[in-house]
Structure formats: structure tokens, C-alpha cells
Amino acid sequence: MAAALGLAATVRHGYSRSMIFLRTPLLELAGIQASAAGFPKHTHDEYVISVNLGGLEEVWLDGKRFEVQPDMLTVYPPAAVQASRSLSGEDWQCLSLYVAPAAFPAYFDCLPPDLPSRLPRPDLAAALRQLATQDTSLREEAVIALLARLPRQQSSPSDNASSNGSLLVRRVQQQLLDDLSQPLTLEVLAQQAGITPAHLVRRFHQACGLPPLAWQMQQRMAEARRQLRAGQSIIEVALATGFADQAHFSKTFSRFCGMTPGRYRQINF
């Protein structure tokens, strides 16, 4: 399977998508080639459901670390801060399914599920691997069937408080999301929260894995990707996500997403 993924064709968050097996408005199935260096903290705007094809990987997800086993699915919810590194000092490969939150009401008439971050389910891991060899015309149907088999996890109130952070942090998150075209300063956020900037950074980082403005930048990049996929011009996207000019936006987008905005638009049309 690993050899079948071939050479890197596109880049996402510092690792390469070796091959795209499926791409629809709500779903994408991609083979991933990750370098031994791993990749730093980042977020996705979709659910990412992955199975490793080779190599040993340690995941950092919202403040917790765990080793990825071959018979395990890993699940990254939208906006969850994640990072990863090789445990063997070598590259590793995986197959990742990117699922837009809107897929669940569209396909199953339900809200997105609350999935555990680790699913030690050899049957589901094998089913995800098999998607890469599925007949192309049947692949979307097979993906939907796999999603229907995922377990649903009910979170207790204490679990929700732990995973989402305090009410203060959630309020700050909402402020950061309210208008991405007008990024706020740390001083303004702290003043509105009634605490010092240092206290805000500490509380926010403990809850989310990133400081407030770094977390907001991830959301700005996610919104930029959405608007570029929707056909917006690069300058329109730059202004909508809080950049003064196209040059500054392009430089920042390339650093976070591994390619220029123009290149990203090309591979997503």
C-alpha cells in the first residue's frame, strides 16, 4: 500500500499529499507522506480521520500525547490543535479522510458526532486502508458507509469543560472569530476579558494549545482556504482575512499552508 501512494503532488500543513483518491465538496481522501521531522501545531477546518500505513508516529492533540498504533484510527475534530513527530526517526505514511462538518447533515441528517481522538478498531482501520483500492466510481459510497460505522461518543459536562476550555476562553474564541477582517490585539482582548495579557495567554494556551492570536491565525488561514476554494480572488481573500495587501497575505499563506494562494486555487478547482 505504501509504495502505491507514489511521489508527493501537493502540500498541506508542511507534509505532502502523495495522491488524491477522492475529492468532492464535502469529502477528500488523500495519501500522506510525512517527513521524519513531523509537523508543528496546526488546525484543520474539517474532521481528519487517519490510519497509518507505515512508520511510527506520536501525536500531540489538544495537550495530550499518544502513540499511533497500526490498528488505530486517529480523529482530529475541526479547529483542534494538533502536531506530530516520528518515533523512529524516519518518514511515515498514512491515509487521511477529510470530512467537512456539513457532510453529516448532508449524508445522515444529523449533527457532526463527538468522536474520540483514538479508535482502536482494526476493522475500521482496515476499511479505511481499503478505500484506496476501492473502484473509483464506488469510492464516495464506500466512504459514506465507513462514516456510518463510526461510533458516537457522549461527552460528560466535565469532559466538555476540559476539551473546550473555560467560559472565558470560549468567549475570547468567539471574539476572535466574529470578524476575521479586523484582527484584535492581545491588549484589547485582555481588557475586554478583565484580566492581564499574560493571564489571558496562559489560560488560552492551556485550553487550546496555542496563544490567542496564533489560534486566530489558524482560523484566518482556514477561512482563506474556504474562500479560495469558493473562487474568490486572492486580493479579496486577503482583505477578508485581515491582511493589508496581497503580498503580505501570500507570504503568510505560503508559510502556513506550504504553497502560494494561487497554487492552492489551482489544485482545488
Image: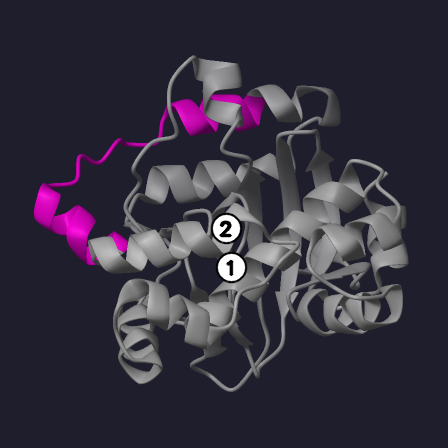
Looking at the image, residue 192 lies above or below residue 214:
above
Q: Secondary structure at mark 2?
A: helix
The residue lying at 56 percent from left, 56 percent from top is 219
Instruction: Write down the residue under mark 2.
Output: 177
Whether tag 2 and tag 1 are in contact, CB under 8 A, the answer is no
Q: Residue furthest top?
A: 109
> Residue 94 in the image: x percent, y percent?
56, 58
Give the CA distance from mark 2 to mark 1: 14 Å
Q: Is residue 150 magenta?
A: yes
Observer able to see residue 215: yes
Tag 1's secondary structure? loop
Label 1 sits on residue: 43
Amino acid type for the residue under numbered disc 1: Thr
Is 143 covered by the magenta stretch? yes
**Of residues 58 and 167, which is closer to you in this image?**
167
In the image, what residue occupies the spot 69% across and 55% down? 241
Type of secondary structure dominating the magenta stretch? helix
The answer to whether 145 appears left or right of 203 in the picture is right
Q: Is residue 63 left or right of residue 249?
A: left
Which range of residues does the magenta coloring cover?
142-164
**What percent of the width, then of the height, locates residue 164?**
27, 53
Local crowd size for mark 2, using a 10 Å CA cut-off: few (<14), some (14–19), many (≥20): some
Which residue: 62% across, 77% down? 35
